[in-house]
Image: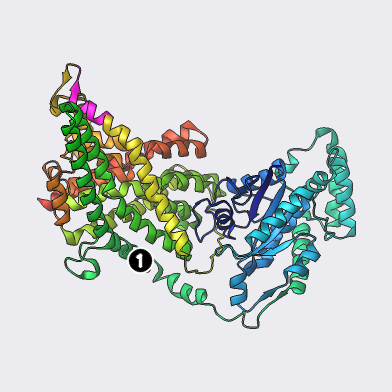
Amino acid sequence: MSITIALAGNPNCGKTTVFNELTGSKQHVGNWPGVTVDRKEGIYKRNKEIKLLDLPGTYSLSPYSAEEIVARDYIVNEKPDAVIDIVDGTCIERNLYLSLQIMETRIPMVIAMNMMDEVKARGDQIDCEKLSKLLGVPVIPIVARSGRGLNELMDAAARVAEERKRPERIPMYGQELEAVIGRLADVLGDSDPDEGWWKAVKLVEKDEAVEKTIDPAKASAIGALMEEAAQNAGGDGETKIVDCRYQYIGKIVRECVKKSRQSHVETKSDKLDKLLTNRILALPIFAVVMYVMFACTFSENFLFVKGLPSPGVWLAGIVETLWGLIADGVVSAAESAGASEWAVGLVQSCLDGIGAVAGFLPLVLVLFLLLSFLEDSGYMARVAFVMDRIFRHLGLSGRSFIPMLMGFGCSVPALMASRALESDKDRKITMMITPFMSCGAKLPIYAMFAATLFSDSDQTMIVFSVYMLGIVVAIAGALVLNKFAFKSDTSNFIMELPQYRVPTLKSVLIHGWEKVKGFAVKAGTVIFASTVLIWFLSNFNFSGMCDMEESLLATIGNGIKWIFAPLGWADWRASVGVVTGWIAKENIVATFGQLFGGVSDEVVEAVMAGEEALPAIGEVFNKASAYSYMAFNLLCMPCFAAVGAIRREMGSWKWTFRAIGFQMLTAYVVALLINVVGSFMIY
């Protein structure tokens, strides 16, 4: 018999970690609230008949943001066979509020008391057996990061699902108010008394979603009962319900939780926060941390030792050498097999295009391993908190910085993360500026130009400055949009700062592997198809095979190059690169790899010697125009997949085109300024 079990809980309580451990999945796990923005499905690896769903984090079943609505609607409307409510044992009082609400739906449930290792480290004790008796549902202690207790948890969840063992209703609202709620439930629950009770409680809480479902024929009877409920609640039913729940939570916590006398002592996280969230030092520290991260990825003189490459550069050299040998071997084999000249050219061109991207995979791996470490440690949540001071002046809250942080990885999940924002204005502005963050697909573009036109000592600073440019332009863009396109109050910013944790090696490696795998999949599909298309377009016209300068691609490029001439790159090949980049940003490197000479033996030797990566680029770009090109591709319309995400989240083509127009205009203006000012400084 197939069983569906939903994983629910507060943001950052460990749901996705549990999901990954139980399913063998590799969903991204971050030590900040809001990583999961949509429900994810998987199969329990020890029993293929059990399907698991990882729901977005929510603090209650009275949702305010789009992601919380996803969680509430699934639990209430689709009614899984069981719910595993994951509770952070270090914040048990706050987490149990959601537990009580889920219990009121009468769906079979199990509570997973997570982070018991941290509870023990604090010197606290939680009596899970006693808590289970008081609540009437199984309470299983677990440590999600190590997998401890997860087998017992799933056994308990499968058992309550098969037995359809519903939680008992806990009387906690007072006799008079509960009597009114009971009569409301009788009116509302024609077919399902449990659903009627839940709706009655939500009506007293003034839940708009439930109010919209009321049958007009019952409105009069319900209105009279609501007036009686308000009187019994002292005039404010919502406050009364919330207060009663917290009173009950306080009662059971006093009975089941023993706090250490040392609990009030300043923790290591508190001490670190005094430094890392300091009003004066926080932003300079963040800049230094980011610079060190880029130095570990791109520096030719790592740790200021001349000739010592950083881990990223060292690995990139090895990959480029190996790819050069593979490419030479494949081309030689094709020639030996008697392949025609055009077939050999096609093979060489495809290998050059894919190789130009593959050579930068180690840089992507190193950068995202380091970024994953910062995310999982809890530091990035502090950055969002610190950025609230800046974003407050832009009409946004610091919560908008979370999707922007995710944008350093990939714009698609970052745009989806914007649904966690409560304000429609915040969501729209955030989606319009999040693509300004430099996603991993743009990294090879910067690395290519840095290796070609800039000295070893400047390469780290160049790449670092492009990333910082994205943040600065995003902030400026938010200011402009808030002032001229949107006019409403700034949303409140309330965010839980997680404890600092040493990231697990498994989590960091999974994150890095997922990024590299994504690049490899693109190289084998989208980029391969693009290189084949580019080869045909650059070697043929309507008369047949021809020189590149007379090809269809050259015709297209020459037709649009006037648009980009003021930006410093009036070459048709540069214009074509911009267009192919809209399919996938890595395509720009693949396109340049084909049109500017490819990955030849000489190029590989030059890279190994720390010299130019694609020498022919220097014939078209100088330092100013190269930086202009990097800035334009940083800020312009993102890839088609990200545009699709904007459309889904905006829910309107009108707003999607507005976002694209804003991004293209911003990219053009910034690139133009860089080229004009840069050219003046050079000459």
Along the line of sight, the residue nearer the viewer: 636 or 529: 529
The answer to whether residue 304 is left or right of residue 580 is left
Crowding near the residue tagged with mark 1, few <14, some 14–19, many ≥20 C-alpha atoms within 10 Å = few
Quarter of the N terminus within the rendering: top right
Q: Is residue 439 magenta?
A: no
Write down the quadrant of residue 640 in the picture.
top left
Instruction: Tell me the chief SS of the magenta region.
Output: helix
Q: Is residue 379 above or below residue 590?
A: below
**Residue 110 x/y as whole percent:** 72, 57
**Residue 285 x/y as whole percent:** 37, 69
* Residue 453 visible (yes or no): no
**Residue 605 x/y as whole percent:** 14, 52
Which residue is identified by label 1?
Answer: 289
Along the line of sight, the residue nearer the viewer: 682 or 407: 407
Along the line of sight, the residue nearer the viewer: 386 or 228: 386
Q: Determine the secondary structure under disc 1.
A: helix
Q: Is residue 536 magenta?
A: yes
Q: Is residue 543 above or below residue 195?
A: above
* Residue 169 visible (yes or no): yes
Q: Residue furthest front?
A: 337
Q: Residue furthest left?
A: 683
**Residue 548 x/y as whole percent:** 15, 28
* Residue sitting at x 54%, y 44%: 424
What is the image's colouring? rainbow
The residues colored magenta run 533-542
Looking at the image, how many numbered discs can be counted on the residues? 1
Q: Is residue 114 above or below residue 578?
A: below
Type of residue at label 1?
Val
* Residue sitting at x 27%, y 55%: 463
